Image: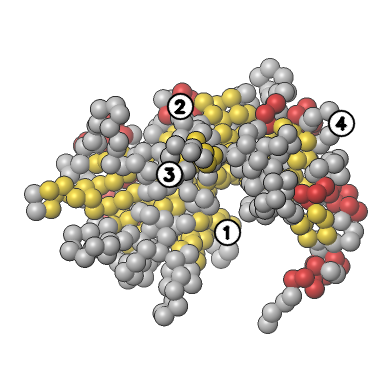
Amino acid sequence: MSLNLQTLISDPDTFGFSVEGDIDASGQSAGLGVRVSHIGDFNGDGHDDLAISAPGLDGFGARQDAGGVFVIYGGSDLADDIADGTFNITRAFGTFGELPGDGFFVQGALEHDQLHGTAAGDVDGDGYDDLFLAAPSFVEIDDPALPFPTYDHRPGTGYIIYGGDSVASLFEPTTNRIDLADLPGGGAGTPAATVINGESDALRLGLAVAGEGDFNGDGYRDIVVGTPQAEGLFYQPDGSVMELPAGIPSPAQFMGRVYTIYGSADRPATIDLAADVVAGDGSTGFMTQGFVETSMVDGSMQADFFGGAIGLFESLAFADLDGDGHDDLLIGASFAGELHNGYDDIEGNEYVSGGVFVIPGAADAPGEIDLSEAIFLEGPATGELLATGFSLANLGDINNDGFEDVAIMAPLMDDGMETNTGAVWGLMGAPPCSVPAVSRDACRSTRWPTSASWGIRPATPPIPRSTISAVSKTRQKTS
């Protein structure tokens, strides 16, 4: 059975409503709907609200691809504003004050910021749900002196826009528009927005974002943000981390990093990832890095396991898989896994299956968690790249067993003779393992049964990188 959406849209009594985009000022697509998020009750009126991202939208003042996020409030005002069933949102924002449901618009601070947003949950515990925005920034520079384009990759920036009445203090006069280039704040110590500064240049923080988790179980919602362009850790065959002099590229380039930021009632005006998280004591949040593992083969060092590139696109999610009251962090790594065919003589025959790292939630996590010691659920070995873990989604408790479940996508999975038809797997939550370490492998297999083609990488509890040299890097694969 198939349904014609255009026919349904024309009948709002049947379909509800549609929100349409348009070509922006530069003549390019605004990309409306690249991300659509249910953000809870942002304004506290008892109705749930939604955020619609348009990362290619040109902002005011000729900011090409600054991007924008439209927040649409639910309720009776929304029904009145879209009585005909259709609302062209990118045209309406030019005059403004006319967003359906009396919502608001947020525009990116700089050209090419490519702003987008998602639900944060109640980060500060004030009873209002909040909004998490990210501007990963991607700037192509045409230099006539070079035969190819170059790129100005900024650090990337994140923003928490707090729900409730305080958001009005961010509006430009006589509008419902927030310009991130000119945030006025909302008072000393309790700003209406928190700015999250990226760790360093060229990292494009914010390509992957997620919120609504409570990793440390303190009652405040946490957020997580990633950057795939950061270098990771390169483990030598003895398990030690390779240290290189400044200026020498790491062989673990583009393995990526993921930063988890804890919610708090304090509402800091800014969070600096380099100072507060990377160099922090774990009270603000924690970082984890992608990695490469190696072994000695015929007298030479060869890469045999990749733990990256993390922080890409829709690859982050929170879910309380074991029902312990702490949301676990799931990190999709579509270019991770055992390097298959890495030592044969056929050029281009190597591949990884991709997979998902699972970091169990905990109240006392260190400032850095070693990803190589996390649980890794590895996609099937089919003979080619699957991109398992390219995107993740918290499904809630779909089988009503009291544990949250997660969907894992693999867009490059083949179906027989059909190429790249894609696949989605459901990871069902289950009780935690309460067994001695010697039985951990069996427990992992019992808790998350897999087909013969799936692998589970055993793990010890997360530990600080400072102790990594004492940890064996030997991997096993269960079936």
Extreme top residue here?
Answer: 188
Q: Considering only order in the chain, which callout, 2 or 1, is on the residue closer to the N terminus?
A: 2
Q: Identify the residue shown where x is 73% and y is 45%.
A: 25
Q: How many marks?
A: 4
Q: Callout 1 environment at 10 Å: few (<14), some (14 to 19), or many (20+)?
A: some
Residue 74 against residue 378 in the figure, above or below: above
Q: Considering only order in the chain, which callout, 3 or 1, is on the residue closer to the N terminus?
A: 3
Q: Is residue 404 visible?
A: no
Q: What is the spatial separation of the Cα atoms under label 3 and label 4, in whole angstroms?
A: 47 Å
Mark nearest the camera among 1 and 3 is 3
Secondary element at tag 2? helix
The amino acid on which the numbered mark 4 sits, given as a three-letter code, is: Thr
Q: Identify the residue shown where x is 30% and y is 36%.
A: 249
The amino acid on which the numbered mark 3 sits, given as a three-letter code, is: Pro
- Quadrant housing the N terminus: bottom right
Q: Which residue is mark 1?
A: 395
Residue 174 against residue 423 in the figure, above or below: above
Q: Which residue is mark 2?
A: 274
Q: Which residue is mark 4?
A: 174
